[in-house]
Amino acid sequence: MRTYAFPDEVEAAATRAEADGWDGLLFQDSQNLTPDITVAMTLALRATEHLVVGTAVTNLVTRHPAVVASTFATLQHLSGGRAMLGVARGDTALLLLGEHPPGTERFGQLLDEVRTYLAGGTVHFDDRESRIVWLPDEGVPAVPVNVFASGPRNLALAATHGDRVTVAVGAEPDQVRWAVEQVRAADPHVPVGALVVAGVGDDLPALREYVRGNASISTHFRRDATAVLSEADRSVVSEVTRDYDVYRHATGSSAQATDLPADYLDRFCVVGPPETCAARLRELVALGLDHLVVVGGGRDADPAVRHRSDELFALEVLPAVRAAVSEGTGPAT
């Protein structure tokens, strides 16, 4: 499950997530929009005993690979192995500083650097060698690197430069199947999962409003892979990209979020009664997924509503999804 690093909510959210049966709690990282993830992850790990805690996602530009490796290795040490580094090229965290996401080749280099640091190896910068002297941490496994991607080049790169891959292409089976095929063509063995925007309940119009903010993010990420979309969905992606307000990233009331038609939200997200959501997620798992990252309400959603929705998902949907995933190899987070 992904949430936000609001410090007044973190400990209670982590405690609830563990009690409700979630495998992990992941935080969005965008320093100009939400509080610091390092504090949030530390609080979440201290409040729990078994929950995996990490990011969905951070980046390796505003946070240098050595800094990221040291931070996550420290969390891994403190928690006895419960840290997860979720990373992507970067979006608002970079754009709001006047930076741009790295190209595919550079992103691959950054991934190699952070994994080398985490393993206790040496990274070379021209004539200088760089390593983290207290790593590897004996008795504690290296932090796994989960690479999130949506376009064909980045999906292939994620497969060959990450420990696992999470595709962010929505929840339609044909799109998820396409993304999994891109990953498998590059590496047939790397664990692969999907990020899914979901809302559970009986009030479908309210659920659509609830998921709009996060649905607009994943829609925006499809701008580099529109060739596999229908003409109607290409138009939606174009409108979202045209209207994207980075300061209102992940908010349901933003211009980009209001661009999403109801029928698109019903297909792109998983919304509806528990049995409907469970059936749709089981269909996705059957495509060969070993994990799911579930995202609900956006930054501007009422925290109480967001927590109730997460709890309902855990109680009414997660058991059925976990049974399907257990036939594979991985968790639902």
Image: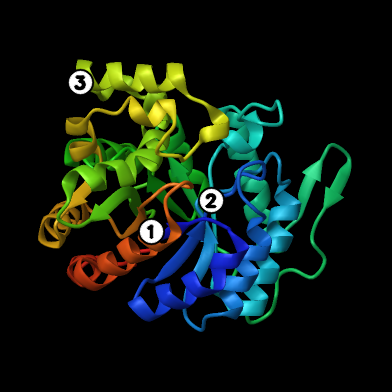
Secondary element at tag 3: loop
Query: Looking at the image, is 271 positioned above or below residue 96?
Result: below
Q: Quadrant of residue 6?
A: bottom right
- Mark 3 and mark 2 lie on one chain; the one further toward the N terminus is 2
x and y, in percent, of residue 194 in the image = 33, 49
Under mark 1, the amino acid is Arg
| In the depicted structure, whether residue 180 falls above or below residue 303 | above
Q: Residue at x 45, y 39 (%)?
A: 251
Quarter containing the C terminus: bottom left
CA gap, disc 1 and disc 2 = 15 Å
Q: Is residue 245 left or right of residue 74?
A: left
Contact? badges 1 and 2 (CB < 8 Å): no
* Disc with the residue nearer the chain's start (1 vs 2): 2
Residue type marked 3? Ser
Q: Is residue 218 left or right of residue 56?
A: left
Give the foreground label among 1 and 2: 1
Location of mark 2 (residue): 28
> From the image, which quarter does the N terminus lie in?
bottom left
Q: CA distance from mark 1 to mark 3?
A: 31 Å
Picture disc at residue 306: 1
Determine which of the numbered discs, if any, sits on residue 230 in the image. Answer: 3
Q: Earlier in the sequence, mark 1 or mark 3?
A: 3
